[in-house]
Image (cartoon, grey):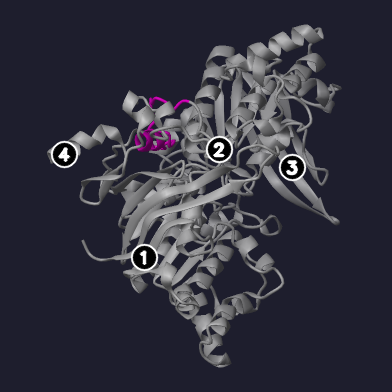
Amino acid sequence: MASALLEIRDMEVAFRIGKKTYPALQQISFKVGEKETVGIVGESGCGKSLTSLSVMGLLPETAEMTKGGMLLEGKPLGPASGEEWSGIRGKRVSMIFQNPMSALNPLMPVGKQIAEMARTHLAISKREAKRLALEMMARVGLSRAERLYDDYPHQLSGGMMQRIMIATALICDPKLLIADEPTTALDVTIQAQILDLLREMNRSLGTAILLISHDLGVIREVCDRVIVMYAGYIVEEAPVADILERPRHPYTTGLLQALPGIGKRGRPLYTIPGRVPSLADRGTGCPFAGRCPSATEQCGAVTPELTETSPGHRVRCHLYASGGRPA
Amino acid sequence: MTEALIEARALAKHYPVPKRKLLEKRSVLRAVDGVSFRIKEGEIFGLVGESGCGKSTTGQMLVQLVKQNGGELVYRGRNINGLSVKEMKELRRDIQIVFQDPYSSLNPKKTIGWTLEEPLVVHGIGDKPARRRLVAETLEQVGLDPDFASRYPHELSGGQRQRVGIAAALILAPKFIVIDEAVSALDVSVQSQILNLLKELQQKRGLTYLFISHDLNVVEYISDRVGVMYLGKMAEIFPVGETGSELLHPYTRALFASVPDVSARKERTTLQGEVPSPIHPPSGCAFHPRCPLATDRCRTTAPELRSVGPGHEVSCHNYEEANVTT
């Protein structure tokens, strides 16, 4: 693997509610290499967005990183290293969100918002910032950039707004772009355009991408590697093609089987029994034990470790604890 | 072809757009602009398209939550425009709808039991014990414990709320249900449970569905035939094949090619541009500015929806000649 751009080491994030703390992320360790594209997939409440917010130092007030740490280019990330978040966000790590309408300032022309990002982080003149912004707008596929520069967000479609967000995020040439469900609010044809754009930006600018999505298909389109999360844990990590062809963790397997599609017509879809445990009832043992068809007594008692079963493929499951095949 | 249970004939809904200047010409937004299709008894008819194509408005016209201002709606061979108030009330028992977000369609101050019982009261069905029994039975049929009747919507998870939404649609024993994006807000593992439930109920009770969704994988999984809408018009209606469907309209092809696939990373030609405004739709075929096959004729004349095979209709000039020869 290339040298790690971002490394998360044994991170734990907990919510404080009243006097109690509830762990929402546990034993999170992964790396994103330079120019690499990594996806995080999981269902609501699995902690995928919380993971990305931690990297940006944007955890909600009630949440706290209780253990572990993050390294960016080998150096501790955030206040731990005496560096201000404002110097990191937008410049070294950027983020785009699901709903560009609420992420853009409705009272400022979109072009100016892109230019402002450049002015904040790079020591350049107003004119230079505008030139850079126009150039970036053209790069992300906004034709007639000159005219759009003075438009306000409400005059733009969802797809165009997401392009503006991407231009804003990339104008300072960050090393890493975090995209949290960037296409979930868009129609499929526009989604395809935005995914193409992300791939193209990764290729031409060399920006590493951490893509958060609930849709494995979206991750397959953009990413090389995928991390599957469940109830605050990483349960599986592997190259995308590998995980889709040979899923190992019972949760990943179930998730893939539950996807509807033309090939599954005429028979009921596979369903994962039960539901995701809430933050309050996450006890000991494997987080998936209660819903797992192959759970044993051991699963309910001991949390399995994330172990490598083949090069680049890691699974958190007792079935693979010995590094081999399931018993 | 067996008799259609419900048929839309050139159904249209135009909304006036408020004037911004005094002397401005009044313009209209053509949300649905002459849509025709027939749904057979026991059939699941999928309706897909992108935001603003008019699929939800079409569904709402079918349950008469929105009144059409053009075209006709025929239920069991009778034009519903001519029905009396009493007959209309009868019809509303037969036709129900399930919405995307059951949280905003359930009254937060009332128990689930109250919500489910109300339609029975309105239609004067049974006495109190009989109604309570029916509520309990219906809850069981959608996979919920009967004691959910005493709970409030906020106590339920998204999947449970959607089950309540389905129970509310079922309680009057309807024949036809419009399912509008009912699984779109759910996680995959819950979505599969709800899809199984809908399919099971359809088979057990012999229901007919109009299944509206933007998720093409879901629609292809569950539907017998699929209608594809673009800018208020029906672009294509095709039967879903066992292994794959034959798609003809250039828009349908582009739409289905855009779906991210877990089994393969596709090399595809992405559809350029965006859907034009329904206030100023393009001349001729609405899709021509984005169509790779557009000709001069497409720019001037709007194509009609024509039959090209069993259960298969296309609205595209490219397939008109083919139709003449067969």
Q: Chain of mark 1?
A: B
Mark 4 secondary-structure assignment: helix
Residue at image mark 3 = A13
Coordinates of residue A51 in the picture (x, y in percent): 68, 37
**Around disc 4, counting alpha carbons within 10 Å, would you say few (fewer than 14), some (14 to 19), or many (20 or more)?**
few
Tell me if label 3 and label 2 are in contact, CB under 8 Å: no
Q: Are marks 1 and 3 on the same chain?
A: no
Name the subunit of mark 4.
Answer: B
Q: Secondary structure at mark 1?
A: strand
Task: Give the magenta-colored segment's residue range.
Answer: B251-272
Q: Earlier in the sequence, mark 4 or mark 1?
A: 1
Point out residue B141 in the picture as x, y percentages from the top left corner: 46, 74
The residue indicated by pointer 2 is: A186
Binning the other alpha carbons within 10 Å of mark 1 as few (below 14), some (14 to 19) or many (20 upward) gives: some
In three-dimensional space, the C-alpha distance between marks 3 and 4, rounded to whole angstroms, equals 67 Å
Inspect this view and state whether residue B222 appears.
Answer: no
